[in-house]
Image (cartoon, helix red, strand yellow):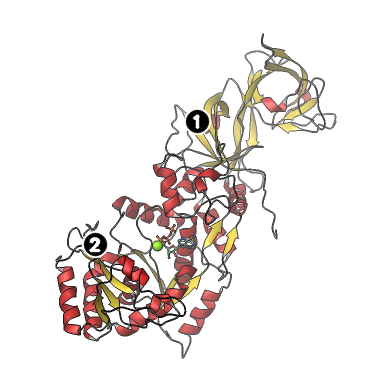
């Protein structure tokens, strides 16, 4: 179970007032809900909303329901329902048996609609969608509807016949009778029900009229006994309607809606519609492509539940819209993996290093520490022999600038093993370097010369006689443009053509042979990696770079 969100936020302050003596919910259990629409996978923006809902319940020792908001019959799918549950569990939150579907309340919602008609608070309107827009009025002109004064009995009869399937789509709507002159357009006799001859993923053909979100949602909250309906800011202007609904239908429980700012992150898009388009147009390999801001994508990339929860907690809960740097999400991951990931050696762009004075056929074993920042994290054996793999970029035939790694005449430390001195290299007929040559100092076992001379650089290496080939996938931002989500921008044109670089023939140390996708490693000097959950097998290891070591996040920027 996740820890409680500690930093104080304005939502918690409101709730404290509400449950205190004299408050709206004095003495009651705090009850929140997370209502995703099962028409796509959860992304990091939803994560903010669900963390707020679940953590707030935890903080107040309350309850949080998971409710599939499947009011709208289009594009909903059980695949998404299952994925959403899996993602939330993975994050460490749970709803016990409080799992609901908005569509389970359709019958009740329908009854409340009849109740409003009978109370003279709703009427059947027959403006076409075009006329509806035409009659909507503007700030200075009230809306109009010639059907507003339709007798109650007639509206009731028409509404029942709408349900019975007598009319085609859009022929009639049911509208609340509130205030056609309201400055808030949501209150200008909003539509409560419309006709849609569409099957529902759970209700099948039972319904051909569907309630609008603004009518269904407050009813669902009220029926579940939700005390605090926490939602994103775009619902602020809908709050008067939310309150109107719970006040005018026969529910004895009146939840309070509180809004918070949506999360935006630079270099990405957080809209299911756009994410779906990336998937459907094969711009990415799927919803769980490791470059996607979806929870399944982040998980496959190597993100841990803890890093994502920390991110959501550290960005806080504010009322003002904010965009957070993607670099901050990466910073949170690095923070977490620094403490938990085992350090290993892997060579991504290998070139052979031959230790010419090391006896052929001889091997020896070094114990290398697993994690220098965690006490008692132990060591693991790493073998050493005459032929090793090193990173091609760790050698230069002629030193340039501040290059202190391998070049003829220079000494470097092979991490955890010996100090070696470069003596030259071998090239093929095209002039390409195929082998680097060196000699080792037998008096430097463990990496420190016996005479105390200084060795500036340490490089990683892998024993060529005891290692595995691997494919390594290096990811960077899916979008070059910092704000691909901006209104009016063609987000597809902002895609980074180099967001995935695939390296094959990489060499990894023997300890990585049985890697499971949940294992995360620091490839020394390179970054944090995890085995790819779809493609990595013991015959063909595939590692994803979760995040590089270089932190580009500047606090306070
Ligand atoms: P999208 O625009 O991605 O389709 P949505 O709001 O339509 O998002 P829902 O499934 O309805 O998706 O979202 C469930 C909850 O998550 C809602 O309460 C919504 O306010 C919240 N939510 C969605 N995106 C964000 C975001 N970027 N930041 C904070 N909360 C979000
Ligand atoms: Mg929505």
Query: Residue 423, percent across and down?
Result: 78, 17
Q: Is mark 1 within 8 Å of ligand 1?
A: no
Disc number placed over residue 484 in the picture, else none: none
In the image, is residue 515 above or below residue 233?
above
Quarter holding the N terminus is bottom left
Q: Is residue 149 left or right of residue 160?
A: right
Percent x, y for residue 285? 43, 39
Do the residues bearing badges 2 and 1 touch, measured as CB atoms within 8 Å?
A: no
Q: Is residue 413 left or right of residue 471?
A: right
Answer with the quarter of the image where residue 81 lies: bottom left
Closer to the camera in the image, 459 or 316: 316
Q: Depth check: 370 or 316 in front?
A: 316
Q: Residue at x 38, y 61 (%)?
A: 36
Residue 387 drawn at (x, y percent):
64, 18
Vertical relation: 206 (above or below) 394: below
Say above or below: 234 vs 78. below
Residue furthest out toward the bottom: 22
Tell me, for residue 196, which label it has, or none: 2
Question: In terms of depth relative to the viewer, which is nearer, 179 or 347?
Answer: 179
Q: Which residue is mark 1?
A: 513
Mark 2 or mark 1, whichever is nearer to me? 2
Q: Residues within 10 Å of mark 1 (few under 14, many from 20)?
A: some
471 left or right, relative to 181: right
């Amino acid at each position: 179970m996740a820890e409680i969100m500690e930093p104080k936020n304005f939502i918690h302050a409101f709730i404290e007032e509400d449950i205190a003596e004299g408050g709206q919910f004095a003495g009651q259990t705090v009850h929140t809900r997370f209502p995703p629409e099962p028409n796509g996978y959860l992304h990091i923006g939803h994560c903010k909303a669900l963390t707020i809902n679940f953590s707030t319940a935890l903080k107040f020792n309350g309850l949080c329901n998971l409710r599939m908001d499947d009011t709208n019959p289009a594009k909903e799918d059980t695949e998404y329902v299952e994925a959403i549950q899996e993602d939330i569990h993975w994050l460490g939150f749970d709803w016990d048996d409080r799992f609901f579907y908005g569509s389970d309340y359709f019958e009740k919602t329908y009854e409340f609609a009849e109740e409003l008609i009978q109370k003279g608070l709703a009427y059947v309107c027959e403006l076409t969608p075009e006329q509806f827009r035409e009659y909507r009025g503007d700030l200075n002109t009230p809306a109009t509807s010639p059907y507003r004064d339709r007798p109650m009995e007639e509206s009731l009869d028409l509404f029942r016949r709408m349900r019975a399937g007598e009319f085609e789509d859009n022929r009639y709507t049911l509208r609340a009778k509130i205030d056609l002159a309201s400055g808030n357009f949501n209150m200008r006799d909003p539509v409560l029900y419309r006709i849609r001859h569409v099957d529902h993923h759970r209700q099948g053909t039972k319904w051909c009229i569907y309630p609008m979100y603004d009518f269904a949602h407050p009813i669902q909250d009220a029926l579940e006994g939700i005390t605090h309906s926490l939602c994103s800011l775009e619902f602020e202007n809908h709050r008067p309607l939310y309150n109107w609904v719970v006040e005018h239908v026969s529910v004895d429980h009146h939840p309070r809606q509180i809004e918070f700012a949506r999360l935006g992150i630079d270099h990405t898009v957080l809209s299911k519609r756009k994410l779906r388009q990336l998937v459907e147009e094969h711009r990415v390999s799927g919803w769980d492509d490791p470059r996607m801001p979806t929870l399944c994508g982040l998980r496959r990339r190597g993100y841990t539940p803890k890093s994502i929860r920390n991110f959501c907690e550290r960005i806080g809960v504010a009322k003002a819209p904010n965009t957070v740097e993607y670099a901050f999400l990466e910073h949170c991951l690095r923070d977490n993996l620094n403490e938990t990931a085992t350090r290993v050696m892997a060579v991504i762009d290998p070139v052979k290093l031959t230790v010419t004075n090391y006896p052929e056929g001889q091997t020896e074993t070094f114990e290398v520490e697993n994690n220098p920042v965690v006490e008692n994290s132990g060591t693991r054996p790493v073998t050493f022999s005459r032929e090793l793999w090193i990173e091609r970029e760790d050698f230069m035939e002629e030193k340039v600038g501040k290059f202190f790694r391998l070049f003829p005449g220079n000494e470097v430390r092979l991490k955890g093993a010996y100090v070696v001195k470069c003596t030259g290299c071998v090239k093929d007929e095209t002039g390409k370097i195929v082998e680097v040559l060196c000699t080792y100092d037998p008096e430097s076992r463990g990496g420190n010369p016996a005479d105390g001379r200084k060795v500036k650089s340490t490089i990683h290496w892998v024993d060529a006689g005891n290692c595995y080939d691997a494919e390594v996938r290096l990811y960077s931002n899916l979008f070059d443009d910092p704000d691909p989500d901006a209104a009016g921008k063609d987000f597809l044109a902002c895609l980074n053509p180099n967001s995935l670089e695939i390296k094959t023939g990489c060499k990894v140390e023997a300890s990585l042979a049985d890697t499971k996708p949940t294992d995360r490693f620091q490839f020394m000097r390179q970054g944090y990696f995890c085995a790819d959950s779809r493609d990595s097998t013991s015959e063909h290891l595939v590692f994803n770079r979760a995040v590089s070591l270089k932190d580009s996040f500047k606090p306070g920027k």
